[in-house]
Image (cartoon, grey):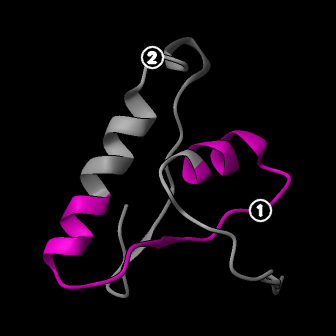
């Protein structure tokens, strides 16, 4: 759930467990682990993913720039 560069991602909370603080608790723990490694925690979230955006913003992440993803088939 963390990458070598400090990225945090791939968190999915099943609908029946949402709004109980699990995603927030896990993300806070991951932020602490990344900081202990001397790295700056960051996330890549599609802006349409409103729930993840809300969680990240509530934890102090700030919007920095738009990222474009490309896929090769």
Residue 71 within the magenta-colored segment of the rendering: no
Q: Up-down: is 50 above or below 46?
A: above
Q: Residue at x 54, y 40 (%)?
A: 12
Mark 2 and mark 1: span between their CA atoms?
A: 23 Å
Quarter that holds the N terminus:
bottom left
Toward the top, the furthest residue is 16
* Of the pair 29 and 70, the residue shown nearer to us: 29
* Residue 26: image location, x then y, percent: 33, 42
**In this rendering, position of residue 53 left or right of residue 67:** left
Bounds of the magenta segment: 31-57
Toward the left, the furthest residue is 36
* Residue 39: image location, x then y, percent: 28, 84
* Residue 32: image location, x then y, percent: 22, 60
Q: Residues within 10 Å of mark 2 (few under 14, many from 20)?
A: few
Label 1: which secondary element: loop
Q: Up-down: is 26 above or below 10?
A: above
Between disc 2 and disc 1, whose residue precedes?
Answer: 2
The dot on residue 22 is none
Q: Quarter-wise, where is residue 20 in the image? A: top left
Q: Up-down: is 16 above or below 4?
A: above
**In this rendering, position of residue 13 left or right of residue 63:** left
The residue singled out by tag 1 in the image is 46
Q: Up-down: is 50 above or below 15?
A: below
**In this rendering, position of residue 8 left or right of residue 15:** left
The residue singled out by tag 2 in the image is 20
Quarter that holds the C terminus:
bottom right
């Amino acid at each position: 759930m963390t990458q070598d560069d400090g990225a945090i991602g791939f968190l999915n909370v099943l609908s029946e467990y949402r709004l109980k603080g699990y995603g927030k608790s896990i993300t806070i723990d991951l932020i602490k682990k990344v900081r202990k490694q001397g790295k700056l925690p960051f996330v890549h979230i599609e802006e349409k993913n409103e729930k993840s955006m809300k969680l990240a913003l509530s934890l102090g992440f700030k919007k920095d720039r738009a990222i474009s993803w490309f896929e090769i088939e």
